[in-house]
Image (spheres, rainbow, N blue to C red):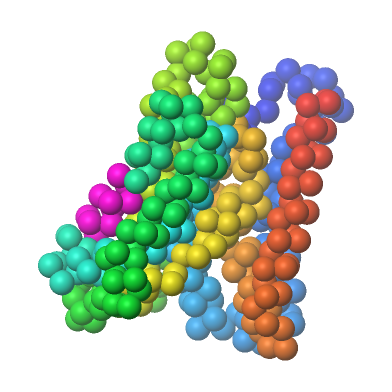
Amino acid sequence: MPADTVHLDADEQGGPGRAERLSALAQQHGALVTLLLAMVVASLSFDTFLTGDNLENMALSSAFLAVVALGMTFVIVTGGIDLSVGSLFALGGVLAAWGSQYGTAVALLLPLAVCGLIGLVNGLLIARSGLAPFIVTLAAMLGARGILLAVTDEGSRTYLVDKDSFFATLGQGSLLGIGVPVWITVALFVLGAVVLRRSRFGQYVYAVGGNEDAAALMGAPVARTKIAVYTLSGLYAGLAGALNAAWLVSGVTILGSGMELEAISAVVIGGTLLTGGFGFVSGSLVGVLLLKVIQNVINQIGSLDSAYQQVVSGAFLAVVVVAQTWLGHRRRML
């Protein structure tokens, strides 16, 4: 069942029903409220925060992480984890930059094919062999980095994208004053929300994450669902890397380090439970934006270095996980 469904019989019970709804709303919209408050405080504290250039930079820098977080949302809702997305992001960017010399189609399809294939292998090993997602995707993370180093001669070669090519326009172009990567990200999130909340596949994702054994008894294709979400995660990571290469007009080998942790943080901050069965893509987008606002505020302060971004983000994530655990326990008690 969708994560935010509230049982009708709880309404008839008066107080407990209202308390359960409030707990559900806090889990679903708490990050959005925090984001709005953070933006209000930042706009009052810094004159440059709400300027067009600053907002555009935040939107563009958020777009690539958001695409990765979108795929991670599907994985975490099933109760899994994907540690390979950071390396797949970097690999996708390098493959896209290399393939751009043969045209836009190759620049887009090559990273999608390779990263999607790695995601498919992850899904097969997890679903068919019963291996732990943590171990499988950790191995994939190392393997993807190895492929990246092989393609770039141990990182010594950087492939460039022709600035006048259509592929570069996908990263640097704009529509109605908004960058093309932002539009692509919004479209993907709308599609992801429809798939997760309105399709049979989305129901299977929730069912597998809620109770895998019960889902199997109900006839849900548990193995196929797991394979699909890990393949999807690999595809999204490869696409994000390709868009980033188009934006930077080069395939930078050092990117993606730690991105898997950022994506997981954004998804969890957005309200998706690490235990699975509860989550929504809109929350993941809010989580990404909240992380970027925090980073931007720290940059605006100027006297703090980038290390504080990690400290603040980690502390905030710890608070969110504790709050989610408490709210989940409270809902079960009602």
Whether residue 140 is visible: yes
x, y percent for residue 195: 42, 37
Q: State the residue in front, 332 or 307.
A: 307
**Does residue 115 sit above or below 162 in this rendering?**
above
**Does residue 66 sit above or below 303 in this rendering?**
above
Q: State the residue in front, 229 or 282.
A: 229
x, y percent for residue 48: 62, 86
Magenta-drawn segment? 108-117
- In percent of the image, x 58 and y 57: which residue is there? 261
Q: Give the position of the N terminus as an image quadrant.
A: top right
- In percent of the image, x 68 and y 48: which residue is there? 29
Residue 214, by quadrant, is: top right
Whether residue 195 is visible: no
Position of residue 163 in the picture relative to residue 289 (left or right): left
Q: State the residue in front, 127 or 210.
A: 127
Position of residue 137 in the picture relative to residue 235 (left or right): right
* Residue reaching furthest to the top: 217
Q: State the residue in front, 60 or 73.
A: 73
x, y percent for residue 130: 48, 27
**Does residue 161 sit above or below 287 in this rendering?**
below
Q: Give the position of the C terminus as an image quadrant.
A: top right
**Does residue 41 sit above or below 108 in this rendering?**
below
- In percent of the image, x 47 and y 37: which residue is there? 196
- In percent of the image, x 34 and y 39: which residue is there? 120
x, y percent for residue 277: 60, 31
